[in-house]
Image: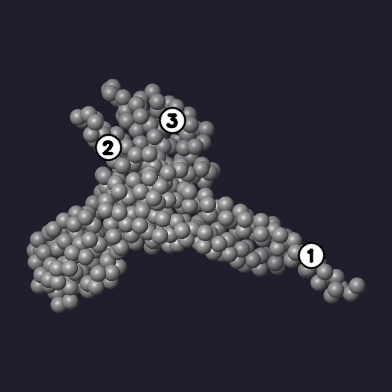
Amino acid sequence: MTELERARKIINETDKEMARLFEERMDAARIVAAYKKENGLPVDDFSREAEIIARNSTYINNEEYRSYYINFLQGNIDLSKKLQHKLLDGMRVAYSGVEGAFANIAAEKIFPDAMAVGYKDFKAAYNAVVDGECDCAVLPIENSHNGDVGQVLDLAFFGQLFISGIYEIEVIQNLLGNKGATLSSIKEVISHPQALGQCAEFIREKGYKTIDAVNTAVAAKAVRESGRTDIAAIGSVEAGKKFGLQKIEGHINESGTNTTRFAVFTRAEKTATPNDKHFVMLFTVKNAAGSLGEAITVIGKHGFNLKALKSRPTKELIWDYYFYAEGEGDITSTEGKEMLEDLKTCCNNLKILGHFEKEILIK
């Protein structure tokens, strides 16, 4: 056997073994896709990809081959994601509103392969997951300019779903009108109260009257159906295109850094991993002096950092509140479990709403 024949024999045997291992890898990708569907997680996980490439490239001893192997790894990752995208094609994601609403845009950006299904309000979208109509729901929990979305926090407190991740998405509000409408012809603007609040300075400067709508896309639809040039909607460019409106003025929101945080709600609690360094929990404290302070002290004592603490009325008793908390640290660790046990001394109710690696910025 010549050296060439020997080399080709090695290549053939190696390729045969690689084919078997490739099938194993793709079978594992199917399991990953099923897990992501059940837990409401997107296909793309760029930090995980970087981690795989950084770790696996160290297995190569020949420095000359390392860059080629990195390309080989990336190719395998891309093929795995293509299969996952295909398998998640039947996933249904609930949101509040109609096509073109910011929640619809958020749902499609987080889950580009899924079918985004609009519902009339937050509660209906939430219940669509509870009832099994949808696999998960993408709902806003906070806007950087207008604050918390109380209705969604209440659903989280009284409901049974979990949060698998939080995504921050930039919100750009635009003035949308029918053909022939101008800044000077408009007398009234219609939109969701959050959007009107985000654009309050612009509205005040122009002297427009305001009308509340269920969401920004509904507002755009109403303007289109009116046919009037003295009324405009405030919403996304996508909503304008959907309903045949023109953009009269762009980026009219008061804050230049206007973002909305969306949470993905799922029926199943996400399986804990060592990379989960963020958590969300809900609790009520006992009706005793210093109980809230004690709860905060317990959290800090165990080395967890509170990023946010918000109070909302429970609506069950007058002046009775529950607390929504976001923190940093692995709450599923031994230290986390000890913290939760200690919190029982000052809390009546305690619910871990979710834990995940990090908050993700979607552009």
Calculate the distance from the C-alpha at mark 3 to the C-alpha at mark 1: 54 Å
Calculate the distance from the C-alpha at mark 3 to the C-alpha at mark 2: 19 Å
Q: Nearer the viewer, mark 3 or mark 1?
A: 1
Residue corresponding to mark 2: 311
Q: Identify which amino acid the numbered label 1 is placed on.
A: Glu
Residue corresponding to mark 3: 340
Q: Is residue 325 above or below residue 104?
A: above
Answer yes or no: is residue 17 visible. yes
Q: Is residue 353 above or below residue 47?
A: above
Please tell me whether mark 2 sits on a helix, a strand or a loop. Answer: strand
Query: In this image, 88 relative to 74: left or right?
Result: left
Name of the residue lying farthest toward the right: 1
Name of the residue lying farthest toward the bottom: 180
Circle 1: is it few (<14), some (14-19), or many (20+) Cα within 10 Å?
few
Q: Residue at x 47, y 34 (%)?
A: 336
Q: Identify which amino acid the numbered label 2 is placed on.
A: Ser
Q: Is residue 168 above or below residue 324?
A: below
Which of the 4 image quadrants contains residue 313?
top left
Calculate the distance from the C-alpha at mark 1 to the C-alpha at mark 2: 64 Å
Residue placed most toward the observer, 138 or 50? 138
Q: Nearer the viewer, mark 1 or mark 2?
A: 1
Q: Quadrant of the N terminus?
A: bottom right
Residue corresponding to mark 1: 13
x then y, percent, for residue 333: 51, 36
